[in-house]
Amino acid sequence: MDNKIVIIDYGIGNILSVKQGFQKIGANVIVSSNAKIIETATHIVLPGVGAYENAMKALSQLKLTDVVIKIANKGTPLLGICLGMQMLL
């Protein structure tokens, strides 16, 4: 089975840098805010920069908070970068 890394795009953070970093090492990476696509990933990345409250509001407005919780409970590897890690905690 091929790995499919999905970077969650909720409008906060430097998505392009994260995507290019994964591509540089040959990873199959997709950027998406679509819950169905995110749920099919073998690995998830939640990047972020800025204020926690604004980031959580953006994630909630896209109805992705439950998706992130579902992924975490399922055991899918989940990497939070910068603010993304704080949001996971």
Image (spheres, grey):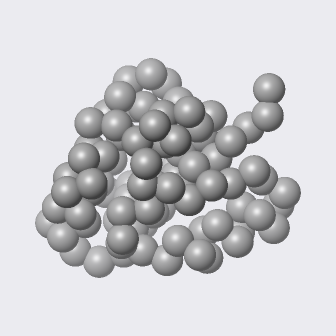
Image quadrant of residue 1? top right
Residue located 40% across and 31% down the image: 72
The x, y position of residue 84, in whole percent, is 38, 59
Answer whether residue 81 is visible to the viewer in this image: yes
Closer-to-camera residue (59/47): 59
Image quadrant of residue 11? bottom left
Position of 66 with respect to 14 (left or right) is left
The x, y position of residue 27, in whole percent, is 78, 53
Residue located 42% across and 55% down the image: 33
Vertical placement of residue 4 versus 26, above or below: above
Vertical placement of residue 33 versus 69, above or below: below
Position of 77 with respect to 22 (left or right) is left
Vertical placement of residue 12 versus 10, above or below: below
Residue located 44% across and 62% down the image: 9
Residue situated furthest top in the rendering: 74
Position of 23 with respect to 34 (left or right) is right
The x, y position of residue 54, in whole percent, is 18, 70
Total marks in image: 0
The x, y position of residue 67, in whole percent, is 34, 37
Residue located 56% across and 59% down the image: 31
